[in-house]
Amino acid sequence: MHSEVFSHVDPAPVAAKSEGGLLGKRVGVQSLFCVQGWPCEGGSRALKGFVPLEDATVVQRVKGEGGVLVGNTHCSELGLGVTRDSAARAVAEKHVDAAFMIDVLGEARMAAARAGLFGFKPSWGRISRFGLTGLAPSMECCGILAARWKDISAIFSAIASFDERDPSMVVPSELVAEGAQTGSGRNGMVAGFFPQSLERLSSEEREAFSLALGELEGAGVTLRQVEMKEFHLFPVAHQVIASVEASSSCGKYDGVRFGHRATGAKNWNDMYVKTRRESFGLLLKTFLFQGAYFQFENYAAFENACRIRARLVQETRKFFRELDMLVIPTQDNARDAFQARSLKELYSAFSCTLPANVTGQPALSLPGLYRSAGRDMGLQVVGSYLEDEKLFSLADRLVAHREGSA
Amino acid sequence: MSKDGRVFCGSLKLSHVGQRVHLAGWVDALRDHGDVLFIHLRDRSGVIQVVFSPEVTPSHVCRLSESLRNEYCVQVRGVVNRRAQGTENPHIQTGTLEVSADELTILSGAQTLPFPVSEKAMLAEGGARRTDSVAEDLRLQYRYLDLRRPTMQENLFKRYAIIKTARDFLHEQGFMEVETPMLTKSTPEGARDYLVPSRHFPGQFYALPQSPQLFKQLLMVAGLERYFQVTRCFRDEDLRPNRQPEFTQLDLEASFMDDHFICELTEEMVCRMFRVGSIDLPRPFPRMTYREAMDSCGTDRPDLRFGLRFVEATDLFQNTRYGIFRQVLQRGGCIKGINVRGQSEKLSKNVLQNEYAREIVPSFGAKGMTWMRVMDGDLDSNIVQFFSDQEKRSIVERFDAVTGDVVLMIADPSYETVVSALGQLRLHLGHRLELISPHAFCPLWVTDFPLFEATEDGVTSNHHPFTSPHGDDLDPDDRQGLLSVLSRAYDLVMNGEELGGGSMRINQKELQLKVFRALGLSHEEVEEKFGFFLRALDFGAPPHGGLALGLDRVVSMVLGTPSIREVTAFPKNRSAFCPLTEAPSEVSQDQLKELGLLDLVEVPSVPGMGERGELIDSLSWAARIGLGEEEKPAVMEALKEAAQLADVAGQRAGEEEPVYAPHRVAGPLREHQTARVCAFAQTGEVFKNAPSVKGDYFKVASVLDP
């Protein structure tokens, strides 16, 4: 079955289990998530006709906790951007209680913000990526969208345990050690904001953002202005690194083991060139060519980007000695992620969400706090790395305060 | 003895015994006997054994000698002694002598060698060392070490001696050596020219000479009468195992002489050159016209070291019942054969039918081969029943066949196919049946070549357009007539290899113009390409002719080396690459820019591609992602952006260690874990998603690169 919201729908969805933390929760996943027996084409000819042989770990766990897999939502090609994504719509139109969406640049938060939903990107290494056909392994996470805040935290606790099939997962022992280091011994909530993230806002949006900050203060949050002078380097590092990773991880789309295969190739090389010419759309191709450029022509640029990333990670983590969260707008009106047709537009639109992908920190886009021009813009709170649970408890208080005041 | 009192190692004789000498050279080999150290000291002249013994050598010298290693460059002083009976070394010329060292200076040390240099055994029972097993590219990479080997030094020395012999001889004969330019004009057939860009004339090129042809003819017009030159020529030709992009040619030209003079002169010179290698060539060199060579050996460079000449048999089968022959003759074809004398034992029915008739001869371009073994005056063959007694008798008679002979025949509608296939068969048999003596040298002049050869739409020169025809009645518009015109060209062939060639030249402008016209060149083309030369023919050009000898080939043949690289100091390898200097190499954009070469690159037609056209193509190939024309502008734009990102990243990167993920990842290839076999691979389920499967394999386009 096929619809505007779903690329595949289970005609008779049932829970695999009759008990568990997610009992009865209806979940949709992008067609980038492997569900055994469901087509998983990732919005790309490269995966044409691909039917996974097993479930992604997150899918398996949803099923294991009594959740119901409803269907696959549409996505932009291999999850790059949100222009064709329907995950948020599936939630907003109540087809599902929650949707899983790969967040590589901030797609999950962006889509949630636009639809007035909660959008959560976990710390990198907290949720298994086994069975996700993504683009940039060091940047992307399994994002969760939901209309109700409690669904997000419930799903997170149901799916976030260690999975040895994902070698990038943080092992539980490290998790405890890391978590013990930061923010401990402080009881209040200190939120940082930095002017560099507000530079591109219109005066009206700034006004709205100030109002949002005021609401936080009302909820007992202490605000502190910080400086992030190298904020403009996040997109540079992200684009160089992610394009290289995409170029590398798209190497598997060769039309040999799955996906589309071009006809009439003269030889093996020709088969690759033709197949991959026909497999990828233009936006993804430009990304893959950038990656190929760094890989084959300018590898120093990739290493330099990784050095910059190291510094950005260090600098950002320093803030969290004194802060519990950073508050950043999720989006602005001038740069519409849903209309982004080029890499330039894409990276410009996601410039406030992608820093969390660069540093791996948990980030949550909250609805209802930051509104401008009659639209919910989404207020993004970024937590300390690997301390997702702490971010949840902060969010609990903000949500409770807002619901109380509403 | 040289000025500084140094004596050459190889020059030591019994008469030196008792003298204290000063030697210098390289440590060829060492033999350590505890207290006593023996070394072979090598210089260009040879090898001498030097002994460091506590009995005669001061202790500090002995200590120093312990640090010696192969190929250390050293200076030694000591007394020449006669070796004790029974310790002589027959492998070196100075094997009865040794030098007891009392002084040692290490002039320069040497690292571990990439391959052994030493060729001389230190002990009587030791065998000669061989470097055959060393990869040639390694030898070429360290050519200066390779050239230290006595064999290579001998080759270079003999090369020098052979060339000097030629120079001396030509000097005797009143020839003078004149140098002609290396930066010349690209010739009309210049597809194989090496081009040299001119900085002063941006976008224009000199060409390195493929031969000094026009200049030497101009020297004749200039009245030098007898010219020669040992010169380098350059041809960017397809790679062949025994071909170099640059090669040395002995080029000569003489005025007022006929072809007999040139050939006589060349014979005498070549004989002297071969004598350097102790090879006596039979004189006079036999002559064969091109036609005779093709008729009897199927090639214009016959190897006369063995027989197996062709026998014409077309006329024997005018009324034959044998279908294949009849059809060939009906189509105007020809039948030729070879009598392989006394080889019926080696050429069994099985070999003849299954190897030669089925495999080998078809690979030479003929459709098949007819064979007959002569047994007791009768013919034995798989098709002999098709021949009449009369035909059998005439075969035996024509081929002069007796018992034990094998008669092979090839029939084809095309004469060229018959002689070409039979010629290759002749060589194949010559080698296989070991009919070729390794010590035989059979020179031959091949003369009277056709002046032209046919092309699809006209004719082209067989040698070059300056070769004189026999006579001057030449109708440029009669294509068939042109193909029958013979030239006054002559090739010197030795053992089936062309060593050189030359011709009498045209010295009349009218005739030269006719030849150009026959070649289809317009007035404008002639003027543009040869105007300067034709003008010279207006000013009293003498009759003249000459020849060019490939010196690398001559030297290689005299010395019996497997390739011309063995007689060239710094050759390119088989791929025309120099492993030593790594030429050819890329040059900087700045160099190209200064030479005005960047502007020559054709601007791609797709808008926006500009100078990044090549980058997009190379990335498209490296990433194996094809692009439609309509996609290119966006990809170009993305690449421009990528370069900008790289700039920013370069400017802003600090000293931090790069990180590749938010936390350190052990990686999927963790150590101490054995590889897992995917269950889906075992069940075969992995094939479910494959576009194409064959058996237990993913099926892909079958050919890598046709």
Image (spheres, rainbow, N blue to C red):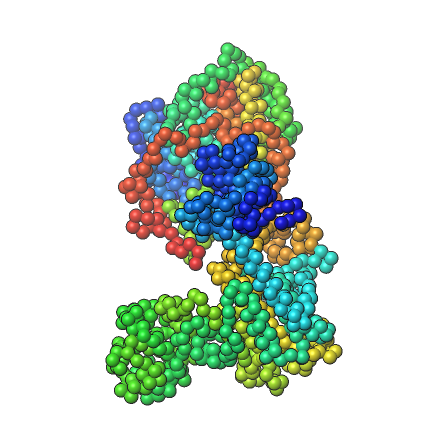
Q: Quadrant of the N terminus of chain A?
A: top left
Q: Position of residue A31 (x, y in %)?
A: 41, 39
Residue at position x 56%, y 31% in the image: B60
Identify which residue, B232 or A124, lies in the foreground: B232
Number of residue marks: 0
Side (left or right) of A317 relative to B683? right
Is B5 placed above or below B492 here? Answer: above
Q: Position of residue B193 (x, y in %)?
A: 61, 63
Is B415 placed above or below B568 here? Answer: below
Side (left or right) of A71 relative to B392? right
Residue at position x 52%, y 44% in the image: B81
Identify which residue, B142 or B575, lies in the foreground: B142
Q: Position of residue B65 (x, y in %)?
A: 53, 35
Residue A210 in sight here: no
Residue at position x 65%, y 72% in the image: B173
Q: Position of residue A309 (x, y in %)?
A: 55, 30
Side (left or right) of B485 relative to A33? right
> Residue B651's quadrant in the figure?
top right
Identify which residue, B135 or B706, lies in the foreground: B135
Residue A315 in sight here: yes
Residue at position x 48%, y 50% in the image: B92
